[in-house]
Image (cartoon, rainbow, N blue to C red):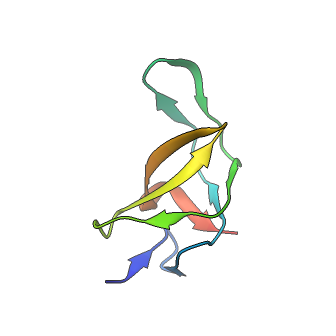
Amino acid sequence: MEVRDSNGTLLSEGDSVIIIKSLPVKGSPKGIKQGTVVKNIRLTDSEQEIEGKVDKMMMVLKTMFVKKA
């Protein structure tokens, strides 16, 4: 299964990605800001989602909102 970022670059386990759009998060007043770096990502079963730690919390992110660092 190939997982690609918003620019079509192939992502793999352990890559670092950058958030390209500020995202709201339920239960958090500030959300995730544009430009936040997410290191050491994990791939999920879905081709359109990845997992990574943002502010010490594990988040599932859509690949359309990230680009490879």
Identity of the residue drawn at 55% across and 53% down: 52
**Which residue occupies 34% across, 64% down?**
48
Q: Quadrant of the N terminus?
A: bottom left
The correct choice, above or below, for 1 with respect to 32 in the image is: below
Q: Position of residue 36 (x, y in %)?
A: 70, 47
Q: How many marks?
A: 0
Q: Quadrant of the C terminus?
A: bottom right
On screen, residue 8 versus residue 56, left or right, reads: left
Q: At x 61% / y 72%, what residue is drawn?
A: 14
Q: In the rendered image of this protein, does residue 26 appear above or below residue 13?
A: above
Q: List x then y, in percent, for residue 6.
A: 49, 67
Q: Is residue 51 above or below residue 55?
A: below
Q: Quadrant of residue 63?
A: bottom left
Q: Residue at x 28, y 65 (%)?
A: 46
Q: Position of residue 50 (x, y in %)?
A: 44, 60
Q: Quadrant of residue 3?
A: bottom left
